[in-house]
């Protein structure tokens, strides 16, 4: 286990927040977690500092009300409006409806708005909001270059004060660009560290997930360092560690 003082160096030096959107039985502590209502619980809420309740784009039965209700129940800081993959107009209509629902809901945290291509036009169609978090959707399986292009285009349109999130992204292929431009992206979510760890572990018996969770934690720490200031610093000597 990494001592907290060293872990905090990485957290404090990170340019973006990395949200773990995987099932690990809340075995590890990670500052940022993101889950749909079906997976969310007080256990995961207590295993992080900032909790996002995500919509479930693979399940049309999960509504914005479901997300907001869950966010209130577990005390999440952020709730994502329902994600619609169809087209820009359908996405815009869904987001406008979701914003109206949120206005009358008890949830008083931040709202995350999942945009779809073309992202700038989608943002413009919902009134160019600047007080909500904006998410870039539909690029979970895209190349890093496509993710970077979409992020830069949206960032140019919305400015540097608006929060921009990458849905389902890892840091591979993005870390150097994030270090070069710390204002490019604010957060992303991914499940890869836990998925890879679970796949790699062929152990049998009880508590296999505990081993996989620790392996995932190692990958998360590595990724956190990659999107921080630390890779660009000179190597410290043993006396100054």
Image (tube, rainbow, N blue to C red):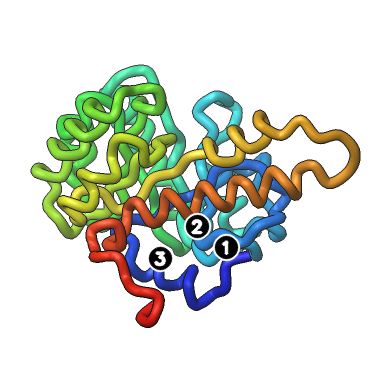
Q: Residue at x 13, y 36 (%)?
A: 153
The reply to whether residue 106 is in sight is no
Q: Residues within 10 Å of mark 3 (few under 14, many from 20)?
A: many
Q: Residues within 10 Å of mark 2 (few under 14, many from 20)?
A: many
Q: Nearer the viewer, residue 9 or 85?
A: 9
Q: Are marks 3 and 2 in contact (CB under 8 Å)?
A: no
Which numbered disc, 3 or 2, marks the residue that appears first in the sequence?
Answer: 3
The reply to whether residue 215 is in sight is yes
In the displayed orientation, state which residue is furthest to the front: 238
The label shown at residue 10 is 3
Residues under labels 1 and 3: Cα distance?
16 Å
Q: Is residue 103 left or right of residue 57?
A: left
Identify the residue under disc 1.
48
Identify the residue under disc 2.
32
Q: Is residue 202 above or below residue 65?
A: above
Location of residue 95 (image quadrant): top left
Q: Are marks 1 and 3 in contact (CB under 8 Å)?
A: no
Residue 25 % position (x, y): 73, 49
Q: Is residue 65 left or right of residue 92?
A: right
Residue 118 % position (x, y): 20, 25
Q: Are marks 1 and 2 in contact (CB under 8 Å)?
A: yes
Q: Is residue 27 left or right of residue 166?
A: right
Q: Is residue 83 left or right of residue 134?
A: right
Residues under labels 3 and 2: Cα distance?
13 Å
Location of residue 127 (image quadrant): top left
User: Which circle, 1 or 3, is nearer the viewer?
Assistant: 3
């Amino acid at each position: 286990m990494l001592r907290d003082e060293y872990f905090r160096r990485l957290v404090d030096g990170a340019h973006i927040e990395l949200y773990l959107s995987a099932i690990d039985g809340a075995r590890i502590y990670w500052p940022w977690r993101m889950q749909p209502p079906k997976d969310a619980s007080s256990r995961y809420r207590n295993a992080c500092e900032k909790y996002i309740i995500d919509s479930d784009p693979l399940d049309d039965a999960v509504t914005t009300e479901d997300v907001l209700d869950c966010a209130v129940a577990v005390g999440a800081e952020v709730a994502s409006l329902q994600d619609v993959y169809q087209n820009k107009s359908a996405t815009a209509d869904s987001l406008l409806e979701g914003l109206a629902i949120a206005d009358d809901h008890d949830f008083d945290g931040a709202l995350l708005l999942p945009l779809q291509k073309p992202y700038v036009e989608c943002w413009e169609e919902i009134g160019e909001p600047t007080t909500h978090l904006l998410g870039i959707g539909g690029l979970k399986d895209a190349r890093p270059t496509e993710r970077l292009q979409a992020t830069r285009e949206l960032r140019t349109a919305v400015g540097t004060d608006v929060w921009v999130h990458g849905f389902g992204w890892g840091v591979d292929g993005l870390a150097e660009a994030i270090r070069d431009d710390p204002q490019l992206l604010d957060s992303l979510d991914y499940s890869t560290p836990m998925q890879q760890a679970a796949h790699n572990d062929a152990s049998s018996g009880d508590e296999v997930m505990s081993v996989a969770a620790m392996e995932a934690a190692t990958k998360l720490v590595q990724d956190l360092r990659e999107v921080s200031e630390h890779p660009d610093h000179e190597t410290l000597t043993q006396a100054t560690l």
